[in-house]
Image (cartoon, helix red, strand yellow):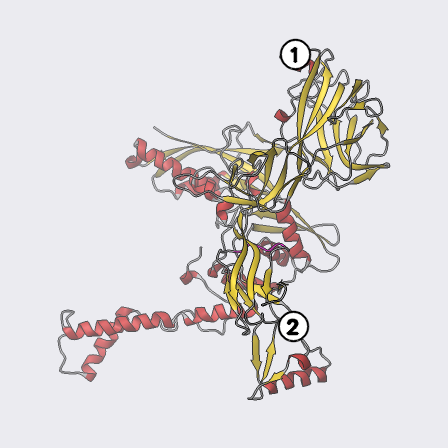
Amino acid sequence: MAREEDIKFDFLPTLPKENLDDRTFEDLVAECILRIPRYCPEWTDYNPSDPGITLVELFAWLTDQMLLRFNKVPRRNYITFLELLGIKLRSPGCARTRLTFYITQPDSYPYRILGGTEVGTERTETQEAIVFSTDEDLYITKPNLRYFLTAENAEDIPNYLREGIISQWTQQTNGEWSGNEQPLFNERPQPGNCFYLIFYPEEHLNGNVIAITFKGLAATPTGINPDRPPRSWQAWNGEKWESVLYREADDLTSGFSFNRIAESGGGAIQVADLILHLPERMPVTTFTGYEGHWLRCVYTEPENGQQSYTNTPRITGLNFAPKGGTVLASHSFFIRDELLGVSDGTPGQKFTLQSTPILDRFPSEHILVIPSGLPPQTWQEVADFAESEPESRHYTIDSLTGTVQFGPLIQEASRHVDRTIARASRDRLPVLGDYSVRRVNNAEGDTERQYGSIPPRGATIRMRAYRSGGGRLGNVETGTLKVLKSAVPYVNKVVNYEPAVGGSDGESLEQAMLRAPKMLRNRDRAVTKEDFETLTVAGGKGAIARALCLPTTEPGVINILVVPNGDKTGIDRGEGIAPDLLQLTAALSETTLAYLNERKLLGTQIRLTEPEYVGVTVETQIGLEPRYNNPQAKEMLRSQLEVALYRFLNPLTGGLEGNGWPFGRVLYVSDLIALFQKIAGVRYIGPVLLYQIRRRGNDWRRGTEPIQSIDPGSRGTICSWRDRRLRTGHLINFFD
C-alpha cells in the first residue's frame, strides 16, 4: 500500500502542497536559540542542561505538533474534493462459490432449502470459522421422465429425433421404467450417436443433483475401456449443452459396461447408478415438438489409444432419484429484522446498522418505517437524493460504515434560487425538480428544499434484512465449506467443489485518492481503450485486479481480458497462485457487464474473457556466501528464493513493477538471474532451466524440454504455482 508521504496528486495543481510548513523540531529549536541574543542578550548559557533551553525545546515540541496537524489541511482538501465528486470508498468484495447439498429421503417433493442457510469452515484453535450463506432458495425435485429419444448425430439444435424405450416399457409405481432389453445407440455405434432424456416442464430441476439407475445384462460386453468410456453427459442450459458429469467416479456404470460390473459378483442383471450435477439454469425448452428439461448422453470420438463401442450398450431398466442440489453462496451472514430506532421527525436523520460492512442489497432487503397505529411502509434505497421529491420515501446506506440516512433539508438564499430559475428560463434549460412544490420561504427569506421524505415522528424504523461480510479472507479453497451452522432437515452433507473467488478487502483512502484522476479522465463514460479498462476494474467492486482492452476487427465489439483478484496468501506460503483461483465466474462477469452497459456507447457489445494463463516451472542451482553454508540458513534461503519466484511470476503481483505480469511480455532467463542477484546470500548462479506449462482441455501439460524464454502471447500472462501431481513448482538446489 502506498505511504501517505509517497502519494503525489498532479490533478489539482492549484491546491497547496502537502507541507504548508516544513520546519522540523530541530529547526524550531535552532531558530529560537538564534533569536536569544536579540531579545534576551543577558542569556548566555545555551547548553541543553540550562532550564531555559528546556523551555525552548518544550515550546518547539508543542509548535511541531501544531505544524503536524496544520500540514494535514491539504489532505483534508483532497478528501473534500473527492466527496464533491461523489467518490466513496469501496466496501470489501464478497467471495462467492457454489455449495452442493446432499439429502436423504424427504417426506415430500419439492424439498426447499431456504436462502440464507449458513455453511462454514471448520473452526480451529487459531482461526474462527469462515461463514457463507446461500443467496436464494434451493428446490430439490424428484425427476420424472417424459420422453426417451435417440438421434444419429448430436446437434446443437436437435432436428431429427426418434422415440424409444418408453413406448415399449412400462412404469412401476415407484417411478421405475422397465421392460425388454433396449439399445442406447445404433446397432453399429458411431461417434455422434446419442440419446435424450426429457423431464416434465413443471419440475424445478435447476441446480439439482440426480441419480440415474441403469439396469443391464451382465453378459453383454460393449468393447470399451470401462475406466475411460467415450461418452459425454450434457444438459441444455438455454444457450448451450453443458457438461454435467462432475467426475468419472460418479459414473458407477463405467460407460454402461455391465459385464465389467459383473466381475465383482452378482446375478445376471446388474444395477449401477450415475450421479449428475445439473446446471443452475435448466429452462423448459421445445425441440421438434418435444417440450421439457433436456438431458443427453453422446458417444464421443475415442481419444488416442482408447477403445470404441463394438456393441451398443443395452439396458433393461431405468429409474431416477434426487440426491441434492447446488446453489450460489456468498461470504456473508444474515441479520434480520434489526431495530434502527425511532424517528424524531427531523430532516437528515441518521442511524447505524450494527454489523459492517454491508453487502449489496437484494430486493427483499429494505427498510420498513412503521408509523404509530398505521401499517408498515416499505422505503426505497437510492444512491443519493439528487432526484428525490419531498414525498419520495427514499434513504441511502453507506455500505462501508453502515450509516443509514434519510432526506436532508437544504437551505439556500432565495435570490440564488430566483437567479437559477431566471437563467434557466432565459436559456431555455430544464430546472431540476419542481420549485413551486419544494420552495418554502422561512423568516429570513431563504428557501428550504426538502430532498426525500422524512419518517413521521415516533415511527419505528427497522431493517428487514441485510447481509454483512466480504473480504479477502473469504477466498477459501475447494472442499473447506462443509459445516452446517444450524441443522437442516434431511441434509446429511454439504461441500464446495470449487474454490471461492472474488473476495477483496475494502478500499483505503489512499487508493481512493489515486483512483480520482482516472475518474476525472473518463467522467464515468467508456469511450477510449483506457476508459474500458478503468471502468472494468471499477465494475468488479474490488474483485477484478487488472483488465486489458484488445484490438478487434469486429465493428462495435469490445473484447476485454479480465484477471480476477485472487487470494494472494499462497504467495508468501511458497505455493503461488493456481489459475483455478483466477476464474472469471459467471456472477462476476454479470456484475461487471451490468456496470459497463450503463456507461458504454450505444451499439457497443462488450465481451469479457479470461487471459490465457501460461504456467512456469524454474529449476536452478545456487552458490551461497560462506556464512550461509549451513543447513538452517540453506532452508531459510530456499524458502526466500521460492517466495521471490512466486511473487515475480504471477498475474497479480508479478513483473518488474509488482503490478502483475504484463500481458504478452516474454519471460527470459535473464529476468530470473537478475531476480536472484538481488537476494542477500547468493554468490553465483548455475544453469537456470525454464519449463512451460500449458492447458490442454481441462488438464495442464508440462513441457519435457527446458527452454530459454516463454512467450505467453498477446492474450496471455505468466502464472506459477505448486502442484506435485502435475510436477509444477520450483526446484532450487545449492552447490556443495
Q: Is residue 219 left or right of residue 644?
A: right
Above or below 13: residue 657: above
Asked if 551 appears above or below 110 in the picture, the reply is below
| Label 1: few (<14), some (14–19) or many (≥20) C-alpha neighbours in 10 Å | few
The stretch of residues the image draws in magenta is: 358-362
Instruction: Decide: is 379 above or below 102.
Output: below
Residue indicated by mark 1: 266
| Residue depicted at x 59% and y 61% | 367
Q: Amino acid at mark 2?
A: Glu
Report helix, strand or loop for mark 1. Answer: loop
User: Camera-side residue: 517 or 504?
Assistant: 504
Q: Position of residue 342 (x, y in %)?
A: 52, 67
Label 2: which secondary element: loop
Horizontal arrangement in the rendering, residue 33 relative to residue 602 (left or right): left
The C terminus, quarter of image = top left
Mark 2, residue position: 391
In the rendered structure, which disc, 2 or 1, sits on the residue that comes first in sequence?
A: 1
Give the image location of residue 413, x and y in percent. Answer: 57, 85
Q: Position of residue 182 (x, y in %)?
A: 80, 19
Residue occupying the point 16% across, 75% down: 52
Q: Residues within 10 Å of mark 2 (few under 14, many from 20)?
A: few
Q: CA distance from mark 2 to mark 1?
A: 76 Å
From this view, report whether residue 147 is shown above or below residue 576: above
- The type of residue carrying mark 1 is Gly
Within the image, what quadrant is residue 48 found in? bottom left
Q: Quadrant of the N terminus?
A: bottom left
Q: Quadrant of residue 18?
A: bottom left
Give residue 253's quadrant in the image: top right
Question: Where does residue 653 sit, x and y in percent of width and height?
Answer: 49, 47
